[in-house]
Image (cartoon, rainbow, N blue to C red):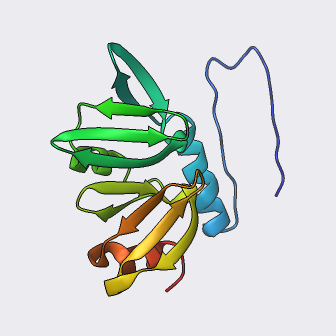
Amino acid sequence: MKIEIDIDDKYSDTEVSIHAKRLDSDVERLIAMLRMVNMQIGVHKGDETFLLDIGKILYIEAVERKTFIYTADETFESDLKLYEIEQQLLEHDFLRVSKQSIVNIRMIKSLKTDINRKIRVTLKNGEQIIVSRMYSDELRRKLGLK
């Protein structure tokens, strides 16, 4: 892969062009990473509102009609419903794993088969999430394990 960078005052905005022989998985990953650069989600903690980079999100969970967003260090709340956040993150590496949870698949450290075809996912920070039977096949497929 060849990378060219041209820094000049004549440019009013940053522009990225990709030239490739064909659209393969490497190019698709590169495009997804570029899209994520500016992908942020509005969240709040206490009386402060933050723009959180989606790449920092471990998982998102709905509890008692509230939506919580977990990073390695903090927990935030969102005014959006879980399905609304899911729609925003469809093109990124997030996957619904139960009725109440969405996980960032880039934050998955390991998988362990649990009882009744459920999967126990361990995240990079050590937290564990149970993937329900309904979503376990999709998780395996998205990770290329099936």
Q: Is residue 43 shown above or below 143?
A: above
Residue positioned 21% across, 42% down in the render: 81
Q: Is residue 109 shown above or below 73?
A: below
Residue positioned 42% across, 75% down in the render: 119
Left or right: residue 139 compared with residue 33: left
Q: How many marks overall?
A: 0
Left or right: residue 100 compared with residue 94: left
Residue 51 x, y percent position in the rendering: 44, 25
Which image quadrant is residue 65 in? Answer: top left
Left or right: residue 8 compared with residue 85: right
**Quadrant assignment for the N terminus:** bottom right
Depth order, front residue of 77/115 = 115
Residue positioned 45% across, 78% down in the render: 141
Q: Is residue 93 shown above or below 55?
A: below
Residue positioned 69% across, 54% down in the render: 19
Which image quadrant is residue 49 in? Answer: top left
Q: Is residue 118 shown above or below 74?
A: below
Depth order, front residue of 8/67 = 67
Residue that sits furthest to the left in the current view: 65
Residue 107 x, y percent position in the rendering: 56, 55
Residue 125 x, y percent position in the rendering: 58, 50
Which image quadrant is residue 46 in? Answer: top left
Residue 59 x, y percent position in the rendering: 42, 50
Depth order, front residue of 14/106 = 106
Left or right: residue 22 compared with residue 90: right
